[in-house]
Image: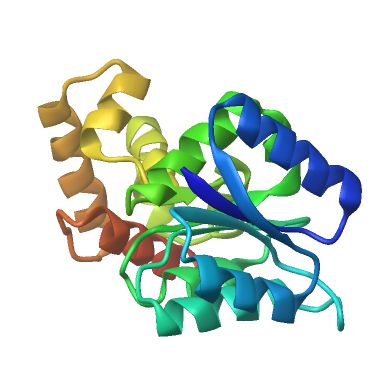
Amino acid sequence: MRIVVAEDLYLLRDGMVRLLQAYGHQVVATATTGPETLDALLRWRPDVSIVDVRMPPTQSDEGLRAALAARGEVPGLPILILSQHVEQLYARELLADGSGGIGYFLKDSVFDADQFIDALERVASGGTAMDPAVIAKLLSSGSSNRRLGQLTEREHSVLSLMAEGLSNQAIGQRLFLSESAISKYTTSLFGKLGITDDDNNNRRVLAVLTYLNQP
């Protein structure tokens, strides 16, 4: 894959470049500021990009804004966003257009090479990849929600994996269950949560995250 890496911390940026190259991917450009990131994304239109949320010059959400701007110009441009902390608003903004090819991971997860590369490849193929730690935080913050409390332990597990962006088939493989069994759990938990079931994985993730973001 042709990849752009946008990260202002040298050690992390260099480490990711080396990791990607070790897995046989090509890093076509790197960026260290928000404006550089937007320029690189639009110039190279890579197969996938890794973009830090907070970048110079303001060290606020320059990277996120550059990613959203690039996707505005090139709909569906695959981008995996990195963040130091879980920010529910970022997850919601990234998934808002429902077009897929997006991911949101914590920087700590980069050190789990296989998981990180798997997420990156999923995003590159047009799917959605959410860090398990992000999903756990969202589920925890919504634990007081009465409807969420109605879910069985198995439905809770399915919901967590669904929110990561996994298909029913992939969820079944993780839980050692058939795809038809996962489909039944999905239908049941969506009914309990009062949200619409959808075969589109990206819309399913958005539906789940929108629900979990509710107060």
Question: x and y percent of residue 120 in the render?
Answer: 50, 43
Q: Residue at x 16, y 59 (%)?
A: 198
Q: Nearer the viewer, residue 209 or 141?
A: 209
Could you tell me residue 109's position as x and y percent? 68, 38
Locate the C terminus and report the quarter of the image it occupies: bottom right
Q: Is residue 180 above or below residue 140?
A: above
What is the residue that sits farthest to the top in this orientation? Answer: 176
Q: How far across and down, in percent of the image, does residue 44 sit?
A: 52, 65
Q: Is residue 193 visible?
A: no
Residue 129 visible: yes
Q: Is residue 146 left or right of residue 64?
A: left
The image position of residue 57, as x and y in percent, is 87, 82
Residue farthest left in this picture? 180
Q: Nearer the viewer, residue 115 or 17?
A: 17
Residue 66 in which image quadrant: bottom right
Residue at horizontal 26 percent and vertical 53 percent from the top: 201
Q: Is residue 135 left or right of residue 62?
A: left
Residue at screen point 81% across, 42% down = 14
Return the residue nearer the eye: 49 or 68. 49
Residue placed most toward the observer, 35 or 143: 35
Question: Which residue is found at the position 40% from the left and 39% from the top?
Answer: 161
Rendered image coloring scheme: rainbow
Position of 102 with respect to 133 (left or right) is left
Residue 16 sits above or below residue 212 on the image: above
* Total count of labels: 0
